[in-house]
Image (tube, grey):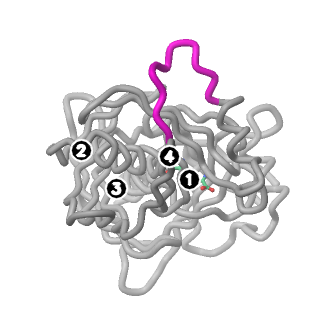
Amino acid sequence: MEICFSKYQGTGNDFILIDNRDNSFPSENISFVEKMCDRRFGIGCDGLMLLENEEGFDFKMRYFNSDGREGSMCGNGGRCIVAFAYHLGIIKDKAHFIAVDGEHFANVSHDDKQLIVKLQMQNVLEVETGDDYYFLNTGSPHYTNFIKSHTNFDTVTNGRAIRYNDRFKTEGTNVNFISGAGNQIQVSTYERGVEDETYSCGTGVVASCISAKLQFKTDDNHFYVKTKGGNLEVVFNHKGDQNFEDIWLKGPATFVFDGKLDI
Ligand SMILES: N[C@H](CCC[C@H](N)C(=O)O)C(=O)O
């Protein structure tokens, strides 16, 4: 069997995209998905996505972490699958799709050289606030904490210590480290399911902006975020307390190459 795929990246968070509208992809085969995602024995990516048909929507997004297991929502992945649907001609400049965490709207635009996708994320109704951390779900679970500077900061070692502590070792969590102030922050993320630092994490960036809003008590609802792989913007409506609505994640979603795999 031949599998056609496309590689995309959104601020360095990279994905394999497969048009599975005919349902031919062996998605139950965890070790096969894991191998496709492997950077040495496969194509290489942080996650793999299937674009499928769903009545009432432009498409359905199914997301797999690079460990081969179907995961929770992926913000950069959501932006990339919208770009993929745009290139396939399934959508024009607007998308309405369904993912594991519910329905999403998105808009596609261009800047001088790339495709920009703005994706609406689920509302956040609850933020756990600890002495030195926040913990919230933006489609995926995110632990966030603030550091003085990213210079010489070891995201992998520090992230792994939190992800595998007694609280999180079974279910796992993504862990974000935030530096900066006000509405301009830098974020690094240790991702569960990849079990490594990724260059950017969309749901993590959203969680970090909400945490920064609560931490810095700024009036701004428009955040500018630097990640290892590029810049993202987040806007939301803070309804008060822990209640955030109309959350949008915006940034480039870029086609890298197409390929074919014989299995
Ligand atoms: N990179 C993704 C997050 C994937 C979440 C996944 N690692 C998990 O929680 O299992 C993003 O852009 O939002």
**Image point 50% across, 39% down: which residue?**
145
Disc sitting over residue 6 in the figure: none
Q: Nearer the viewer, mark 2 or mark 3?
A: 2
Amino acid carrying label 4: it is: Asp
The mark closer to the camera, 1 or 2, is 2
Residue at mark 1 to residue at mark 4: CA–CA distance: 40 Å
- Cβ at disc 1 under 8 Å from ligand 1: no
* Residue identified by numbered label 1: 17
Range of the magenta residues? Answer: 145-155
Q: Quadrant of the N terminus?
A: bottom right
Which quarter of the image is occupied by the C terminus? bottom right
Q: Is residue 145 visible?
A: yes
Whichever of labels 1 and 3 marks the residue nearer the N terminus, that label is 1
Mark 2, residue position = 217
**Label 2 or label 4, whichever comes before in sequence order:** 4
Q: Earlier in the sequence, mark 3 or mark 4?
A: 3
| Disc 4 secondary structure class | loop
Q: How many residues crowd around disc 3 within 10 Å: few (fewer than 14), some, or many (20 or more)?
A: some
Label 2: state its secondary structure: loop
Q: Residue at x 16, y 43 (%)?
A: 220
* Amino acid type, mark 2: Lys
Q: Earlier in the sequence, mark 1 or mark 4?
A: 1
Does dot 3 land on a helix, a strand or a loop? helix
Report the Cα–Cα distance between label 2 and label 4: 16 Å
Residue beneath the point at 64% across and 75% down: 23
